[in-house]
Image: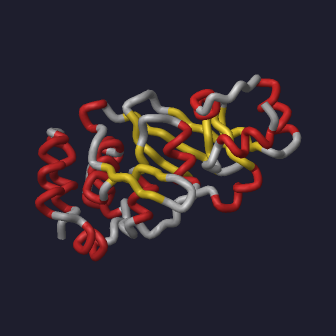
């Protein structure tokens, strides 16, 4: 396969080797390696690449959804997105039913934290100009965060240190959905702090 054939075959900035094979292309690993060396492609992890020409318009959120599947953005990334925490988050944090992993490449740092399969829900698809990604609903992002940080939240001071924005919680969370999701977690320890999120 020639590079021009690759660019005509793949219409998205981020792609996998499987995308090429699905598109009826014949490709060898040495070709991908050579195109990375020439600066045509960016290697994001084994089997996942991006066109270097598109680097400026690729959203990290899209990369996060492609690097490690199944996964969806949640925790600090989603809480910052919804304005529930004040900090800008420069790491893309997702949850996955697979084992915890971290990947770093030229487009950023991508952290995946494990949740049991029974809690892998409460997200929606966000479409972009160049692709798509999955983002936790605000209610699920808050509960994911409390659930995965239970060991660190043992007092009112610990809760206050989370720096949740009460106004944004009030504006953003659907109380009925939040209670339904909390019930589905069925974890007694997070109930006290979850109720504090509904000022």
- Residue toward you, 160 or 80: 80
Considering the image in quadrants, where does the N terminus appear? top right
Q: Is 48 left, or right, of 153 in this rendering?
A: right
100 in relation to 135, above or below? above
All told, the count of numbered labels is 0
Please report the residue visible at 25 percent of the width from the left and 59 percent of the height from the top: 156
The outermost residue toward the right is 38
Q: Check the image and report above or below for 33 versus 154.
A: above
Q: Is residue 38 above or below residue 90?
A: above
Query: Residue drawn 63% across and 36% down?
Result: 48
User: Residue at horizontal 85%, vertical 33%?
Assistant: 34
Look at the image and name its color scheme: secondary structure
Which image quarter is the C terminus in? bottom left
Quadrant of residue 173 within the rendered picture: bottom left
Q: Position of residue 104 (x, y in %)?
A: 65, 42
Q: Write down the quadrant of residue 8 in the picture.
A: top right
Q: Is residue 109 left or right of residue 99?
A: right
> Where in the figure is residue 32, as x and y percent of width and height?
77, 32
- Dividing the picture into quarters, in which one does residue 7 lie? top right
Q: Position of residue 46 (x, y in %)?
A: 66, 29
At 54% from the left edge and 62% from the top edge, which residue is drawn?
Answer: 129
199 sits left or right of 125 in the view:
left
Pick whichever, 127 or 147, lies toward us. 127
């Amino acid at each position: 396969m020639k590079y021009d054939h690759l660019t005509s075959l793949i219409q998205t900035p981020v792609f996998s080797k499987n995308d090429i094979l699905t598109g009826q292309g014949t490709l060898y690993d040495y070709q991908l390696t050579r195109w990375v060396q020439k600066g045509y492609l960016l290697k994001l992890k084994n089997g996942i690449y991006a066109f270097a020409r598109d680097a400026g318009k690729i959203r990290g959120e899209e990369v996060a959804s492609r690097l490690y599947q199944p996964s969806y953005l949640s925790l600090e990334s989603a809480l910052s997105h919804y304005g529930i925490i004040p900090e800008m988050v420069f790491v893309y944090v997702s949850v996955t039913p697979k084992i915890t992993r971290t990947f770093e490449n030229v487009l950023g740092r991508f952290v995946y934290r494990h949740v049991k399969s029974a809690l892998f829900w409460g997200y929606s698809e966000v479409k972009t100009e160049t692709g798509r990604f999955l983002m936790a609903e605000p209610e699920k992002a808050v509960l994911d965060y409390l659930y995965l940080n239970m060991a660190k939240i043992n007092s009112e001071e610990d809760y206050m240190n989370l720096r949740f924005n009460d106004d944004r919680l009030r504006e953003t969370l659907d109380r009925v959905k939040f209670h339904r999701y909390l019930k589905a977690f069925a974890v007694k320890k997070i109930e006290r702090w979850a109720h504090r999120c509904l000022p």
